[in-house]
Amino acid sequence: MSKRRVLIADDLLFFRAALRDILERGGYEVIGEAANGAEAFDKARTLSPDIVILDVVMPVKTGIDAAREISHLNMPLKIVMCSSLGYEPIVEEAIRAGACAYILKPLNEEAVLQTLVSLEADTP
Amino acid sequence: MNEDKLAIGLCGLKLALDTAEVAGIVSVRHAAYMPHQSGFVSGVISLRGEPVAVVDVSRAFDCPQEDAPDKAPSRKVIVVKDASRTLGLDVGAADVYFLWTEELKKSVPGESRAGFAKGTIELDRDRYIIIDWRALFDEAARVLATEESHV
Amino acid sequence: MDTSKYKALYLQETSEHISGIEKGLLALEKGDADATTVDHLFRHYHSIKGMSASMGYEPIQKLAHAQEDLLDRIRQKRMTATPTVTDALLRCLDGLKALLKRVEDGGALNLDIAPLYASIKDAIEGRLDQAAMTAPAAGRPAAGRPAPDAAAPGASGAAELKLSHVMKVEGKVFDDLMATVGDLIMALSTFKAISHGSRSIELKEGVYMLGKHINALHNNILSARMLPIEDLTEGLPRVIRDMSQKSGKEVELRIEGASLRLDRSTLEGLGAPLVHIIRNCVDHGIESVDERLRAGKPRSGVIQIKAYSKRDKVIIEVSDDGRGINAARIKEKARARGVAEERLRAMTDKDALMLVCLPGVSGADVVTDTSGRGVGMDVVKGVVEGLGGAIGISTVPGAGTRIDMELPLTTSIIKALLVTEGPELFLLPISRIERVLEVHRNEISGGRFSYDGAVVPVISLGAALGMAEAPERDYYSLIIVHGRTLSGVSPAVEAETREVAAIRVDAFGDEIDAYIRPLAPPISRLWGASGITVMGDGRAVFLLDVSQIVSKALLTA
């Protein structure tokens, strides 16, 4: 199986760098980074990643809005939300917007990789 | 009416002011002449570097002028002040003393709005007239205003 | 996760968010924060919280989290950012800064954030404003709780505060400073007089140095007191809007050079004259729309204010493109008012315009049926001259009128001559004095004195001011003054129309730098004086209004 290609979207370089490290150690290829929801949408469309990891709170366009728009593209990709916001209504909204997993910050390497592996289970 | 008072014995009258409004008492030898000063206006002095217009209390209360303040070598000027007004009250060589709240508890307030009085208090058979200095201020402003002023 | 490699990124990004928070909170406090500002604030706290959690910086995370919650409530309009709330947030910001400083220095995050945290929780639960209200004297924190600023984070955070180079200071502070320097200058003049009469070199040297430093101080305060003209003109668009609505005319205002700075007191004094002039422009200068269209002019009239500096003066021009002033009618009016025929004939139209500043000529009747203006122009001239300035008028019939006001950069301290009359001291502004002479009483005949090939009227100062008559003296001092200044006229005309007079006093004294205070009630409308000063010895001395004294004496002569 070829390396899964991942797009990371977070307004903080701090989290992008941390996530990139975790993913690369776990055998994923990070094909792009975005600093806001709008950029994430553009890059998801042009780079065709297998996985898009979206932060919820981002400037310009939130991760949830970006998730909704990316889902409407009907591309073969999985959307994972990644946020420190753990309120149930937000998680629910993210799922309605098309997310299939939710990573809670602070980032925990094991938890992140486990979540991504679990995505494979329901890959068509 | 029972706040501390400054009492002034002037030509047989007993006058009073709230001490809270007294900014200072100055001994003055010469008040600067104001152009065309008239009536009870008696010039300008300074208190702590600020010019203060002065009115002659004995004239305001129609005292006989035999001991006119001009002849006294040194006169007392009581400077009264509120947020927007400052005025000097020239009381000549009058006696000035205090009436404290404690004593004033026995006093009986009375009405008197004639002239520049805004009330009276009676204490030990003495009747004090409380000076309405704001009325004096307004009257001074009226007397000193000129039609051809550049304002 | 191994966090150490992310520390630099963490510090860099948090510091950006901290600046963002600072800006946002200040806007919030000032009440000019919109939804976006609040959104951004929320995100800044959120980011700091998230990064801090990942780095394991628990106190920072906790504090940021509490504030994020608070902002979320404000964002959802579930609470409002009252001053106590923004105050608490600003204190917490200091706490955050102090903690981040520790992170940067590699120190332990052992600052006690409990009071700060509690203040945010109180704010969220609405206890903060109550606490502030019930214990105003005790300060902000809730009763029984240590004050947040007593906590270590607040204290060390405050030490890190960087202040702006621009300070906001109440205008009164500068007025007080100016008054103090004025008093210093007055005290200095006493010393100058003493050192003048002394042989001590040390004293002379000391007084010289003292004077030098007081001058430097004076100059610094003067420049600090300068305000841009726009502070005065920013209210004008509204004034013009109201005036034009009332008169049914269309008027457009253009302002140029509004950033030029003038002394606060000068600027304050200009308020009324400026409105006077503009009212004249609207009422009498600018024509109705119909009239303008008939004359081939654009519908709406233009009033232009132009300010610029010329050496140590500031010129403010107010012009309109209205119908202008008819100089011939002004002359007629002046003639009726008793102005000498030969004087009028010598005048150019331009000089004649200044006649609208004579009290009698500037009556409203001139204005209504002729094509002129004049309401209150004598008042305008009086105020401008009172500020040590001069005024000029020029007009082109049918095309417009321009009023020039030439003002000194400051007016509070002026050079003046001390004179004595009887027991009294007065000051005359040096700018009005041509010469000072000592004469025998026989040289004055019939109230006239021959000076410079001309005969000038002699005005007894005592009589002019209504003082008690004094016995005649053998010698008097004559102060040759000019009463009115016409700016912008030819030298020949100026000489012709100038009101020169000799003010007779008992004696003259020193020339001093006098700190002049405006006349305050109850003497604000006193005739004959334009200001007052308090001398070093406490004596109050009036600065005399030369124009007023000379005009009146000449009219009644």
Image: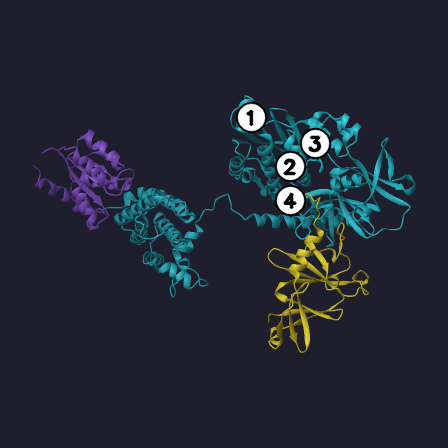
Chain colours: A purple, B yellow, C cyan
Amino acid beneath label 4: His
> Which chain letter matches label 3?
C
Q: Is residue C183 above or below residue C393?
A: below
Q: Which of the image's four quarters has the C terminus of chain C?
A: top right
- Residue bearing the label numbered 1: C291
Quarter of the figure with residue B136: bottom right
Distance in Å between CA atoms under marks 3 and 1: 27 Å
Task: Judge whether residue C466 can be spotted in this image.
Answer: yes
Q: Which residue is mark 4?
A: C218
Q: Are marks 3 and 1 on the same chain?
A: yes
Q: Which residue is mark 3?
A: C354
Residue B17 position in % (x across, y down): 65, 66
B20, above or below A106, in the image: below
Left or right: residue C194 compared with residue A88: right
> Residue at (24%, 46%) from the top-left corner?
C2
Q: Are marks 4 and 3 in contact (CB under 8 Å)?
A: no
Residue type at numbered disc 3: Met
Residue under disc 4 on the same chain as residue under disc 1: yes
**Label 4 crowd (10 A; few <14 / some 14-19 / many >=20):** many
Question: Which residue is outermost to the front?
Answer: C369
Check disc 2 and report the residue beneath it.
Answer: C375
Which chain letter goes with mark 4? C
- Between marks 4 and 3, how big is the CA–CA gap? 36 Å
* Disc 1 chain ID: C
Pair 2/3: label in front: 2
Expressed as whole percent of the image width and height from the top left, the position of residue C62 reads 30, 54
Q: Camera-side residue: B124 or C518?
A: B124
Image height of B133 relative to C373, above or below:
below
